[in-house]
Amino acid sequence: MDFNLQAYQADHLLHLSVKPERRLSILENRQHRWLEMDGVVQSAMSLAEPGSLCLPHQQSIAERLPARANRILELGLGGGDLTRHLAMRWPKARHDCVDLDAEILTLFQQFFQPSTLRAPRLHQADALHFLLQSRERYDLVLLDLFSQDGNPLLLFQAPLYQALAQRLEGTLIVNLLPRTRLEQDQALRLTREWIGPTEAHAVPGYRNVILHSRRQQP
């Protein structure tokens, strides 16, 4: 069930926290529950169909998922929209989710993790540190990291993609929110250099660009 980003209206405020670096709220109406950061919708869940995807960039990601995945890693959790969708699609898959923000992990468990879907393994960690410490191999990695106005610097530096190359045996999908064409080109170059053949897909009407890459074994 799509979430109308131009015309949504909340009936209830379920959670509010204000810190110097950000304001975080969880709101709800009869159809949806959603997560906002600094007034911008980051995640939205259909109350009737928690495993469905409501936001356009997530639907674009879903179109590029592989036919099957057994070992999944998400770097960046938010409200867990793709987490629920993947749990519905592949209920027996091993699924790790990493987020640096402990509050995000807690709120996901409290508000966005329905008991009808298998829970992922949650890790509070920096994405690069997790990759460097992990010995797991994954056939699907979703990279969805954000700072206040776009992607963090990490997404435009080689060490992240070098570490991903050591852990990935299949598909990488990156949700990019580039501030400039230079940022987009840099992420695309790094993905092609360290992962393999990569395509960039714009999301009509939004800043999001979805990078879709397949690991090319050396």
Image (tube, helix red, strand yellow):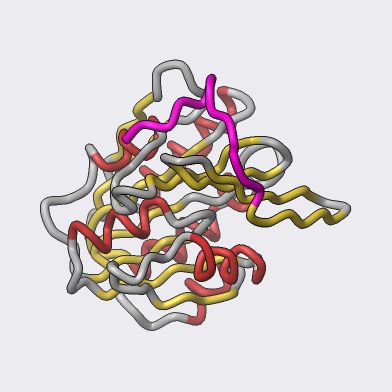
Q: Which residues are magenta?
A: 1-13
Name the spot of residue 114 as percent of width and height, x first.
37, 65
Q: Is residue 22 left or right of residue 213?
A: right
Name the spot of residue 28 as percent of width and height, x first.
54, 45
Number of numbered discs? 0
Name the spot of residue 45 as percent of width and height, x first.
42, 47
Q: Is residue 202 left or right of residue 27?
A: left
At x 36% / y 74%, what residue is drawn?
A: 119
Q: Farthest residue in the right direction?
A: 20
At x 35% / y 47%, what residue is drawn?
A: 173
Q: Is residue 18 above or below residue 212?
A: below
Q: Main secondary structure of the magenta part?
A: loop
Quarter of the image with the N terminus is top left
At x 38% / y 83%, what residue is drawn?
A: 135
Q: Farthest residue in the top direction?
A: 205
Q: Is residue 200 above or below residue 212?
A: above
Which quadrant of the figure has residue 14?
A: bottom right
At x 27% / y 63%, what residue is drawn?
A: 87
Q: Is residue 10 above or below residue 114?
A: above
Q: Is residue 171 magenta?
A: no
Taking depth in this image into account, of 152 and 48 the one nearest to the observer is 48
Which quadrant of the figure has residue 177?
A: top right
Quarter of the image with the C terminus is bottom left
Q: Is residue 7 magenta?
A: yes
